[in-house]
Amino acid sequence: MIEGVIIGLLFVGAIAYVGRGVYKTYKSEDSGCSKNCDC
């Protein structure tokens, strides 16, 4: 039971991490930032 909860949390965390990275990439491209700018 504990293992299932830990795996679930890791899974949700990984999805949130990837989603945030994709969102930042899309957002920076949408606003016309250069690739080396950290926005």
Image (tube, rainbow, N blue to C red):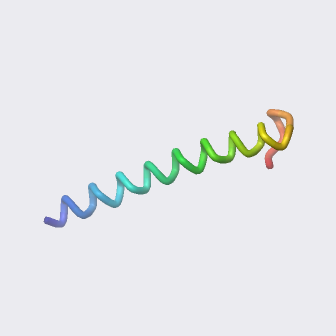
Rendering coords of residue 23 (x, y %):
64, 46
Vertical placement of 19 versus 36: above or below? Answer: below
Q: Work out which residue is located at the far top of the displayed protein and give it.
A: 35
Q: Residue at x 59, y 50 (%)?
A: 20
Q: Is 10 on the left or on the right of 21, as rendered? A: left
Q: Residue at x 39, y 56 (%)?
A: 12
Rendering coords of residue 13 (x, y %):
43, 56
Q: Residue at x 18, y 66 (%)?
A: 2
Q: Work out which residue is located at the far front of the displayed protein and give it.
A: 30
Quadrant of the image for the N terminus? bottom left
Q: Is 31 on the left or on the right of 4, as rendered? A: right
The answer to which of 26 and 39 lies nearer the viewer is 26
Rendering coords of residue 34 (x, y %):
85, 34
Q: Work out which residue is located at the far left of the displayed protein and give it.
A: 1
Q: Is 7 on the left or on the right of 13, as rendered? A: left
Rendering coords of residue 17 (x, y %):
52, 50
How many labels sit on residues? 0
Q: Is 37 on the left or on the right of 24, as rendered? A: right
Vertical placement of 11 versus 30: above or below? Answer: below
Vertical placement of 39 versus 6: above or below? Answer: above
